[in-house]
Image: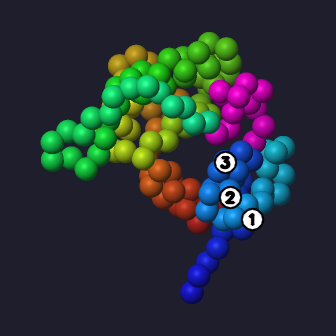
């Protein structure tokens, strides 16, 4: 049995998978713009969904199937600190998420955020792998 996704609750988050995987057939969920719009979305780099191509060096530690890029981790940290300086309300809780396809990159990001922002960083920024977010979203949907 084939099951297809038809709607997504995430404005610009919908655009990429819709175009790349669903022949532009995905639609926004009901009231998604009203429920998810934030003041910082006015800036393209702080939109609900943004990709950044950071010129850094990816490495794959021996025996690992994962990748890490220290320059990308530092860029994300600088970008987050700029967001919080511009929009202090972001310090109130997990309103920012960082998604990486690689477990080692997530580990490095969490480590750097903890080093710079302290243990509270785990409460402020949701850093996870693509799979980790998918499991979280599925679990959240199932428990509501």
Mark positioned earlier in the residue sequence (2 or 3)? 3
Instruction: Check if mark 1's residue and mark 2's residue have beta carbons within 8 Å.
Output: yes
Lateral position of residue 77 relative to residue 93, left or right: left
Quadrant where the N terminus sits is bottom right
Q: Nearer the viewer, residue 73 or 96?
A: 73
Residue 128 in the image: state x and y as whole percent. Answer: 44, 43
Q: Which residue in the protein does label 1 denote?
A: 25
Which mark, by number, is residue 18? 2
Q: Which residue in the protein does label 3 denote?
A: 13
CA distance for labels 2 and 3: 9 Å
Mark positioned earlier in the residue sequence (1 or 2)? 2
Looking at the rendered structure, the secondary structure element under dot 3 is: helix
Lateral position of residue 35 relative to residue 133, left or right: right
CA distance for labels 1 and 2: 6 Å
Residue at the image point whose x is 74% and y is 47% from the top: 11
Give the mark toward the camera: 1 or 3. 1
Q: What stretch is highlighted in magenta?
A: 36-49
Residue 39 in the image: state x and y as whole percent. Answer: 77, 27
């Amino acid at each position: 049995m084939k099951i297809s996704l038809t709607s997504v609750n995430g404005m610009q988050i919908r655009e990429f998978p819709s175009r790349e995987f669903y022949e532009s057939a995905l639609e926004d969920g009901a009231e998604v713009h009203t429920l998810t719009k934030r003041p910082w979305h006015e800036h393209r780099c702080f939109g609900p969904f943004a990709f950044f191509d950071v010129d850094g060096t990816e490495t794959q530690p021996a025996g690992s199937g994962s990748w890490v890029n220290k320059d990308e981790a530092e860029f994300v940290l600088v970008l987050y600190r700029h967001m919080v300086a511009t929009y202090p309300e972001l310090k109130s809780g997990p309103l920012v998420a960082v998604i990486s396809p690689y477990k080692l990159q997530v580990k490095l990001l969490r480590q750097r955020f903890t080093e710079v922002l302290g243990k509270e960083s785990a409460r402020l920024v949701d850093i996870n792998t693509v799979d980790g977010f998918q499991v979280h979203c599925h679990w959240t949907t199932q428990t509501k």
